[in-house]
Image (tube, coloured by chain):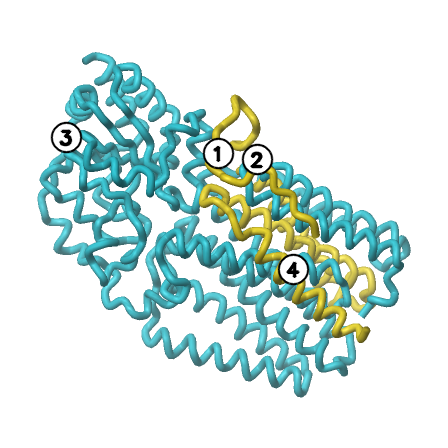
Chain colours: A yellow, B cyan
Amino acid sequence: MDTNVALLTIFILSIFVGFEVVSKVSTVLHTPLMSGANAIHGIVLVGAILVTGESETTTATVLGLIAIVLATINMVGGFVVTDRMLEMFKPKKAPKPQEPAAGERAGK
Amino acid sequence: MTTFGTPAWLQLVDLFVAVCFVLALKGLSGPKTARNGNLLGAFAAVLAVVVLFVAYPHMNNLGLIIAAIAVGTLIGFPTARRVKMTAMPQLVALFNGVGGGAAALVAIIEFLGSDNEERGILAATVFTVVVGSISFTGSMLTFLKLQEAITTRPIVLPAGRFVTSAVGAGTLVAAVGLVVAPSTWLLVLLIVLAAIMGLLLVLPVGGADVPIIISLLNAFTGLSVAASGYVLGNVLLIVAGTLVGASGTMLTRAMAKAMGRPLTNTMFGAFTVKSTAGGAGVADDRPVRSSSAADVAIMLGYANKVIIVPGYGLAVAQAQHTLRELVDMLNAKGIATDYAIHPVAGRMPGHMNVLLAEANVPYEQLKEMDEINPEFASTDVVLVVGANDVVNPAAKTDPTAPIYGMPVLDVGESAQVVFLKRSMRPGFAGITNELLYDPKTTLLFGDAKDSLTKVVTGVKNL
């Protein structure tokens, strides 16, 4: 398969997965879900490390290091703040959330 | 471009990480699985970074890279740990912005470092730069708005629509030009235009619509990360970025729907509204009925049914605990008392639930809007603590109001309404609330915590 077509396939299928996984989310979870998704795109850190690891000019290195700092803030801060939001759902005396579906477990 | 240089085992790890991200998002959509979902995502993200150093132990600038990660962690971790729950929305905006900035920088480095011969890659690079820059400046402006460093009202520039269209067109032309004939000065011009575009998109968004914009910019950042993945030939970035872009888009629509506002209305509403000032001059002169804490205590103490409407003011005053004390006391007297939680009470969907959960308010007492709205007609006293826009009847009656169409709590249906307010200042959306001037409304001015403490004492002494 042509590389570009392969990447396009991955892209299109990911869109559908993205739509599908959040299709039934209660209002209460809108903010944590947004925040969690926000942390996930901090994965751009991987890209930032790759380009900085390959860079040979000072400009590229400096820009790359800035990108790494920013991406790390996004990723680390994002997951930590989401966890704080979700502390309310920790199982103390079984808080009764009004979400219908409980035992869902999606594959890929 | 490094697809074929990536070892197969690393690609398999990335596949595992991508699956973890899907499960993380899935987990985050259910209350029972949310926390573990987030932890799974964090674990996978850390794994994806660590394996890079195993795969490429001889990368350039290794020491500096590790130092930069340390700096980012030292900034991100304590900030996220320490932020007050009330300030959480702006922190999410800030994190989103830096992510977009990072994606744009990655694309800029690739642009500067390659011969830019392949059009497809070049187009993806340009896309990343544009969307990443928009997300960066847009999120920073949102941060400033939520921080109330600048006005929270919609800002409409003179000829705003024209300026936005012109800058938008300019961005598009520069982007296409850059793909056709790559040059560094055109790249700089494009970055500047896209950065201005980000500001212009957020400026006219005001009040309760800000969370929706954060969610939208979040989806934008996701897409720019996906595009940067295409530039780098990195499948993990494509999958993770696209997941966030797609789920973020769905989430944005869900939020807009929960607030009864089509997305286009959110973004461009301010352009079509004639007056967003809400005639403050006229409104301020009208008489209101203010009262003492003791009177409010009597009203509450002799009611049969009370509904509490908590808002951002409650959170700012850190009065959750005092409020819970009051409600416990009323319940002990046999007065049916519930909390009415508007979907966007606070600053974001679900924000108030988080704040009240912190004060150990039992989940069962928190009633959502659809559930509680029919109850107001049979309620003796509604106590509105530091909320304004979410009980503003203008959302139903005044088509020119910026919040028109947003579902609100029908507190006006009840026999009496008590507002605990700091001042007559309008709410986050910057519009006057007619309910404040209603004859059945009583106002108790002051800091929410002070007022509540006095009311608690009053109820105790009854």
Q: Are marks 2 and 3 in contact (CB under 8 Å)?
A: no
Marks 3 and 4, the one that precedes in the sequence: 4
A6 vs B277, left or right, is: right
In the image, which is nearer the foreground, mark 3 or mark 1? 1
Residue marked by disc 2: B32
Tell me whether marks 4 and 2 sit on the same chain. yes
Label 2's element? loop
Label 4's element? helix
Which x, y percent locates residue A33? 55, 47
Residue marked by disc 3: B291
Marks 2 and 3, the one that precedes in the sequence: 2
The answer to whether residue A53 is above or below residue B318 is below
In the image, which is nearer the foreground, mark 2 or mark 3? 2
Residue occupying the point 64% across, 66% down: B104
Query: Mark number for residue B241?
Result: 4
Residue marked by disc 1: A97
Tell me whether marks 3 and 4 sit on the same chain. yes
